[in-house]
Amino acid sequence: MRTAIISHTDCRKHRMIPDHPECPSRLDAINDRILAAGLDIALTHLDAPLAEREQLLLAHSENLVKTVEDKIPEQGLSDLDGDTWLCPDSLLAAKRAAGSGLLAVDKILAGELDAAFCAVRPPGHHANKDTSSGFCIFNNIAIAARYAQQQGVKRIAILDIDVHHGNGTQDIFVDDLDVLFCSIFQHPFYPNTAIDSNEHI
């Protein structure tokens, strides 16, 4: 199985407040496990490209993209949503994170890969069309899925496995019958999604 790991050193440049759990060492933990498992030599290593602004707009509103652009500080940190901060390199990292999924789609549709793992940050599944939240600036998987649709993919399934509900991804695709979204998460952790036993979320 031809599998790639897609990442970029720019993803390490996104920094938030000291001791924040969403930190560059998350990428180190992934790399360490890949090396310990002996998988490094079996994977193709690719650099994530920068997503273009119009590609971010496949899943997000102009208002959200402009808000992020305007809040990037020249130095220090800027508070984006109360638990997500931006540093001078955060937009660069976020565009690489989104670009990783675009490259994965291109390589798989071209028949060059069978699968890809995007080892990037910042993460994405809490960001909805209009709002960044939960450490997430842009919704990387939603951008990749919209891009795949643009390339002619008719049906898409997204399986979100995390201790937290992928509420942003769900919100983006809630009215799209061509995208199946499944989220496995631990209730009632953030984002405190209400569960009604008579409803599917």
Image (spheres, helix red, strand yellow):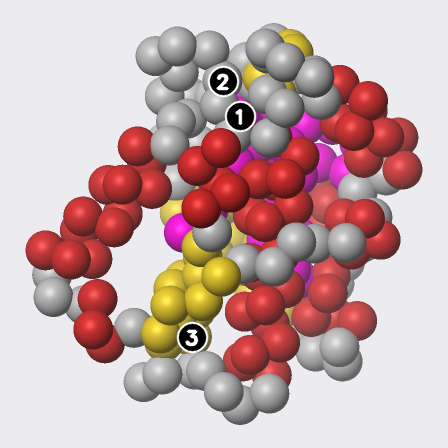
Q: Examine the structure image and report whether residue 137 is included in the region drawn in magenta.
A: yes
**Magenta residue span:** 119-145
N-term-proximal mark, 2 vs 3:
2
Where does residue 145 sit, x and y in percent of width and height?
A: 66, 62
Note whether 146 is above or below 24 in the view shown.
below
Q: Which mark is residue 115?
A: 3
Classify 10 Å Cα crowding around label 2: few (below 14), some (14-19), many (20 and above).
many
In the image, taking residue 104 as reference, residue 22 lies left or right, namely: left
* Residue shown at 75% from the left, 18% from the top: 71
Report, in whole angstroms, how far the alpha carbon at label 1 lies from the one at label 2: 9 Å
| Residue 1 in sight | yes
In the image, taking residue 37 as reference, residue 170 lies left or right, namely: right
- Secondary structure of the residue carrying numbered label 2: loop
* Residue shown at 79% from the left, 42% from the top: 60
Dot 3 amino acid type: Ala
Give the residue pinned by disc 1: 135
Quarter occupied by the C terminus: top right
Where does residue 139 sit, x and y in percent of width and height?
A: 64, 43
- Secondary structure of the residue carrying numbered label 1: loop
Where does residue 195 sit, x and y in percent of width and height?
A: 52, 29
